[in-house]
Image (tube, rainbow, N blue to C red):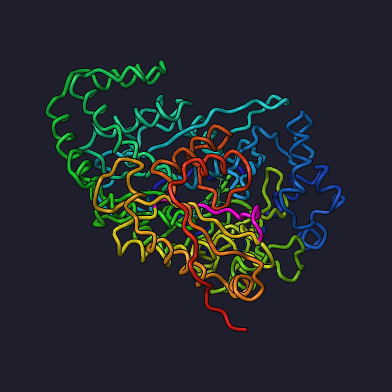
Amino acid sequence: MDGKKLEFKGEEALKELERLTINAREVQETILNDILSRNRETEYLRKHLKGVTDISEFKSRVPVVTYKHVLPYIERISNGEDSSIISGHPIIELLRSSGTTGGEPRLMPSIAEDLDRRTYVYNLLMPIMSKHLSGLDKGKVMHLLFIKAETVLPSGIPARSVLTSYYKSDHFRCRGADPYNDLTSPTEVILCPDSHQSMYCQLLSGLIHRHSVLRLGAVFASALLRSITFLERNWHEFTNDIRTGRLNPTITDHACRAVMSHMLLSPNPTLADEIESICNNASWRGIVVRLWPKVKCIEAVLTGTMAQYIPMLEFYSGGGIPLVCTMYASSESYFGVNLNPLCHPNDVSYTLLPNMAYFEFIELENGLRCGNGEEVQKEKVVGLVDVKVGRYYEIVITTFSGLYRYRVGDVLQVTGFYNNAPQFKFIGRRNVILSIDSDKTNEEDLHKSITTVKEILEKQNYFLIEYTSYADSSSVPGHYVLFWEIKLISEKLEPGNVQCLVHPELIESCCIAIEESLDYVYRRCRTHDRSVGPLEIRLVEGGTFEALMDLLISQGSSINQYKTPRCIEQGPALGLLNSKVKGCFYSPKDPAWSA
Ligand code: AMP
């Protein structure tokens, strides 16, 4: 596709959206025909199609694959073989995904024109938002955006995260003035590879511009909350910088110092006093609207596993402004946008954009509970416009950059159609994450059971800040372990203080409530077969999950794309969590089960 065709802005972008969604079937066919003709000479397609470019042959001969099958090609490209083994265009970079499956970092091929596709999606967001909120061009946007250091592969091409690639590209750096996207963060600060210094400077810039911020956010809710808690701990430093007009000496990055020192230029004790009196408040409930009084919405992904952050963000925002989830995207491809941005995060559906890639869907019987196998029955794979409302599917993509019928691993549920393009609720990742015996508990099951007990905790004034899980088979029988970090809702406590205040009965009642909400097989294993032991909750000290994030970032994750792993295995992450445990609580009785 010619990049120029994707340069739509404002009203034009909305018109293009109408055209694409009305003609979804034709657009998809054109995309696939284009991919097949442009990539017909690749080793991959020659092997399966032997020069044929027919769509029905593609569907019958090209297998539906997982990353395991793609990996040998990726390794060859990393080691310097020509892009033409999988793509008709030069692969300019390999994009490091956040590795949401079992923590494995995956590398995805990317070609130059992919940047145009991403830009097209970004250009759509503000026209959609402006249909629902007015005046968004009358102020600034405090988006906390981060890059991650990249590595150069033996072939000479970079391996980096998709957002690092985007923020470093001319598409972002040379984007020109846009009244809807006047960022508080200077580009130099966003491009600082030290995420601590970058976060500091971005928060400081946001505070300096506090009276003109209209939108505030980050890509994923986890990074936004991480930034708010950073502010909670370090606000004295920020007020000090503003009061004195001198940047904190811990900021050593040259470019950051230059641009921030210019922004601080003269001391501003009035602004420092304002911020100090707000931050000094005993409760941080509603802090966002107090610090940024003109803010109209908070933007971050809050769907899927990010849904657990909704209460925390509602707490910090005070509940009076919308939490907006704008888009659904990945390193493999960008997928879609939310056309109803002011709806509650629980009700978000993403409309898939038919011009991003060629999409297929594997029908699943029952959400995440199915589809864990590698085998895919042909008749279960349907095209974009053939999905049915209410059903669950795993998304499969074919791209210009060299992924063919690749299973992304995300499970989606169809909620409706916009024109002829389906709209999907994001359900979760496909894989089973916990299993001791014949029980199989996946991300969605775990999330649902955790949601049930959150209410129990919240009634007692506690927030569940973060959780992860571990299938502990070191004892016999093995059992599920949940690591929880919780916090009292109404007070500001120093990290580490909260756990000693918790009544053991409260956490034990959570253990049993979780077991009660897990599926039949789990409860049978627990009560009848005795092949699974009582569920355990290990409360960890405050700040543990931030330490986990730091550890995983040091191992290659990017702060922008970071998602807390919902299950961990043996290794440094488990060691870290165990070293922070303040109390262990077990299910005091068997969950209900009947034969
Ligand atoms: P990455 O490749 O690191 O960018 O991660 C992409 C993955 O993040 C997707 O495959 C999804 O699992 C998840 N993701 C991206 N956008 C959303 C969204 N809007 N809601 C829920 N999960 C998302």
* Residue shown at the point (54%, 28%) measured from the top left: 149
Residue furthest toward the bottom? 595
* Residue shown at the point (56%, 63%) measured from the top left: 412
Rendering quarter of residue 497:
top left
Q: With respect to residue 532, does 563 lie above or below?
A: above
Q: Nearer the viewer, residue 9 or 338?
A: 338
For the N terminus, the image quarter is top right
Image location of residue 568, percent across then percent down = 59, 48
Image location of residue 430, percent across then percent down = 62, 59
Q: Nearer the viewer, residue 175 or 105?
A: 105
Q: On the rendered structure, is 583 left or right of 183?
A: right
Q: Would you say residue 16 is visible in this rendering?
A: no
Give the residues drawn in magenta, as a range: 465-476
* Residue shown at the point (36%, 44%) measured from the top left: 217
Q: Would you say residue 91 is visible in this rendering?
A: yes
Q: On the rendered structure, is 57 left or right of 250?
A: right
Which is the main secondary structure of the residues drawn in magenta?
A: strand
Image location of residue 131, percent across then percent down = 33, 56
Q: Nearer the viewer, residue 422 or 522?
A: 522
- Asked whether residue 470 is drawn in magenta, I would say yes
Q: With respect to residue 362, does 31 lie above or below?
A: above
